[in-house]
Image (tube, coloured by chain):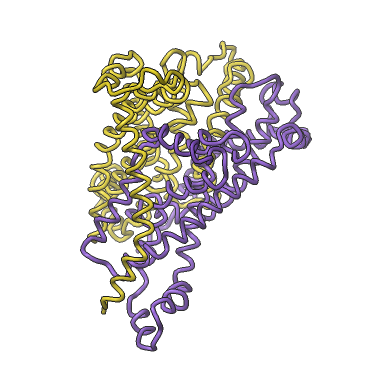
Chain colours: A yellow, B purple
Amino acid sequence: MATKQTGNLARFMLAPSVLLLFVWMIVPLAFTLWFSFQQYNPLNPIRDGFIGFSNYMLFFNNPAFAAAIINTLLIVVCVLLITIIGGILLALLLDQPMWGQGIVRILVISPFFVMPPVAALVWKNMIMHPGYGVFADIARFFGAQPVDWFAQYPLFSVILIVAWQWLPFATLILLTSLQSLDGEQKEAAEMDGAGFVSRFIYLTLPHLSRAITVVVLIQTIFLLSVYAEILVTTNGGPGYASTNLPFLVYQKALLEFKIGQASAGGIIAVILANIVAFFAMRAVGKNLDK
Amino acid sequence: MARAVTTRHKTIATTAAWIVALLIFFPILYTIITSFKSEQEAIQGFSLIPSGTTESYAEVQAQSGYFHFFLNSVILSVGSTILALIIAIPAAWSMAFSPTKRTKDILMWMLSTKMMPAVAVLFPIYLIFRDSGLLDSRIGLMIMLMLINLPIVVWMLYTYFREIPGEILEAARMDGASLWGEIWHVLTPIAVPGIASTMLLNIILAWNEAFWTIRLTTTEAAPLTAFISSFSSPQGLFWAKLSAASTLAIAPILIMGWFSQKQLVRGLTFGAVK
């Protein structure tokens, strides 16, 4: 029953969202692309000009670049492994009949609502501080030497904090999916004498596969741009031991004012995100057809 | 034939689940406990029983004007959410009820903007903000947060609106309702729960956003994310004060989050898992 007037109005209603997002996406990105081919330093504006791919070469030849890429990927892969495996185990546990299930759920989901700077600072000072943290208290209780986590294992410490923040998300989504598993199917499998392990492999895991895909894709988008957790704990160090790509670009742009190199790094981050996004869109897009 | 759950099975599951849940919740719990200790107590080793003093809360407000940052967080998260809803409701409505061949492409494209790494546009945005005097202004940051979350808001509203049966609208049209009447008198009341859920989730996301809120503010418009980050270089004894500031920063959103578990799943998976 869509008349021409309805169609026009529909377009008119859609326009603000589309226009805003288009400008928001295209204008800054075009600037970044332009800067990535420029010699530009706001503190030393005389040597400005077009320099081709030099910024990209500089960025690639910077030893920090390789470290940043490896750290970026390590954060993504390790956090994904911890949260997916931990999330499946937790979801299976929370799906069991128990007393106080509602409260348990609330406790488990809570870390997701903690803003990143708070999560990072609480772990840094309350839990992992070599002098006053709970880990140090535990170590001393057993007569061991407390570990200076952020100095000795900086990347591991960052991964631990980020995994703590995202485990609730994975658990909640996997649990939601688990609870939509047909009870009759489960009972039928049980009647056929299928044990817990074979039920898990042949029934539960295939059912969860879709939710797992969604968790992987969405977490990857966020994990590629971990920032505040590094800023308030290790500040990227020691050296470049816990610097990821977003953090390196931030350092280049706002601390060293090497805008060209920072922009080249930004474009590389976009390319990296696009590779992930390509798969993400296909997975989410499939759902639209249903 | 329902299988009888044995009490033993239930006891084991309950015990295991509570232990794991308390371990996961422990950093938050310990922060809340420490916030009621004095600075001296806070560094005297592990203890779950605070003296119950509220001096840290008073000090955080007295030393740093905590309430200013709290107010900014409220203004920014609620303001950006309302702004996003005003822009997104018509868009989601038109895509849900007058879909065209391109609707799916537009939705996917909107989602793709969410995947652009913020750091890639950090400097241009910084320049634009600086040159237009928007740095450290509430309105600038509000627009920024609105743009970041607009795709999620459109998507969430779209998945809710799509579940509203079209017959209701046709019936209203038969009764001679105008298009705007249709939206405000027929559609909106049905859509209120979906809009409310979207609003809740978006406030949470905006409250916790910790890249632009830290980089584009200094003091005037700085919300709690920026304020808490200033604790990253400790000066003297600050464990109890950090705990008090952290507790205040997460408490309101934690409580909102508990009420929005279901919407969270739906919103953050773009409707792929319900």
Q: Position of residue A53 (x, y in %)?
A: 24, 22
Residue A215: name its quadrant: top left
Near-viewer residue (A114 or A187)? A114
Q: Position of residue A107 (x, y in %)?
A: 54, 44
- The image quadrant where one finds the N terminus of chain B is bottom left
Residue B19 shows in this picture? no
- The image quadrant where one finds the C terminus of chain B is bottom left
On the rendered structure, is A5 left or right of B255?
left
Report the residue that reaches farthest toward the left.
B101
Q: Position of residue A6 (x, y in %)?
A: 31, 75
On the rendered structure, is A90 left or right of A137?
left
Residue A220 shows in this picture? yes
- Vertical placement of residue B83 versus B60, above or below: below
Q: Position of residue A166 (x, y in %)?
A: 43, 38
- Vertical placement of residue B28 versus B143, above or below: above
Q: Residue at x 37, y 71 (%)?
A: B164
